[in-house]
């Protein structure tokens, strides 16, 4: 994984990790982190779709670094592609020790969402 600077934009979600999010050793569950990333991507997708949007796919995810109880996790989500009813959102999760300033990329993935109507069937994404 290339060493790179964290995003300069505001995170979509920022949260402190808690003991309930971790195993007995204090390591945060991967599923918890994926859930945070899905929520961040969902916020971006719903805003762009101007309504309900559902997750239909997530590309392969690799964890680059662990997250521990007490860490601050910042999730950044950016819309990268809009189709007729689908949207792709690039998501990155970064950690920061609660007492430090150094940030570290934890994982990244591209989430695909589809805009759906009241009938829960795909609908066109509104034009910008």
Image: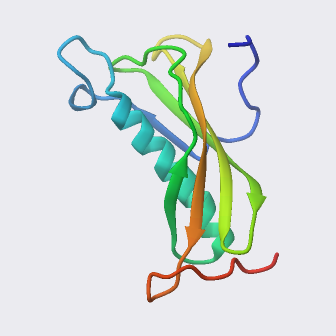
Position of residue 122 relative to residue 108, above or below, is below
Q: Position of residue 128 (x, y in %)?
A: 82, 75
Q: Residue at x 33, y 23 (%)?
A: 28
Position of residue 107 relative to residue 39, above or below, is above
Q: Which residue is situated farthest in the left direction here?
A: 24
Q: Quadrant of the N terminus?
A: top right
Question: Is there any visible trace of residue 91 in the rendered image?
Answer: yes
Position of residue 51 relative to residue 20, above or below, is below
Q: Residue at x 50, y 42 (%)?
A: 37
Q: Residue at x 67, y 61 (%)?
A: 87
Q: Quadrant of residue 35?
A: top left
Position of residue 49 relative to residue 105, above or below, is below
* Count of all numbered marks drawn on residues in the image: 0
Q: Position of residue 117 (x, y in %)?
A: 52, 85
Is residue 18 left or right of 52 when viewed as pictured?
left
Question: Is there any visible trace of residue 93 in the rendered image?
Answer: no
Q: Residue at x 42, y 21 (%)?
A: 71
Q: Which residue is situated farthest in the right direction here?
A: 128
Q: Position of residue 40 (x, y in %)?
A: 54, 50
């Amino acid at each position: 994984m290339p060493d790179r600077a964290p995003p300069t934009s505001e995170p979509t979600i920022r949260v402190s990790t808690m003991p309930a999010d971790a195993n007995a050793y204090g390591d945060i569950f991967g599923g918890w982190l994926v859930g945070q990333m899905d929520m961040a991507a969902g916020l971006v997708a719903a805003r762009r779709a101007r309504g309900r949007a559902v997750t239909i796919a997530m590309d392969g995810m690799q964890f680059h670094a662990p997250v521990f109880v007490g860490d601050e996790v910042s999730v950044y989500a950016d819309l990268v592609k809009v189709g007729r009813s689908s949207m792709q959102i690039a998501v990155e999760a970064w950690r920061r020790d609660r007492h430090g300033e150094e940030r570290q990329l934890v994982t990244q993935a591209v989430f695909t969402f589809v805009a759906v109507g009241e009938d829960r069937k795909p609908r066109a994404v509104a034009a910008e």
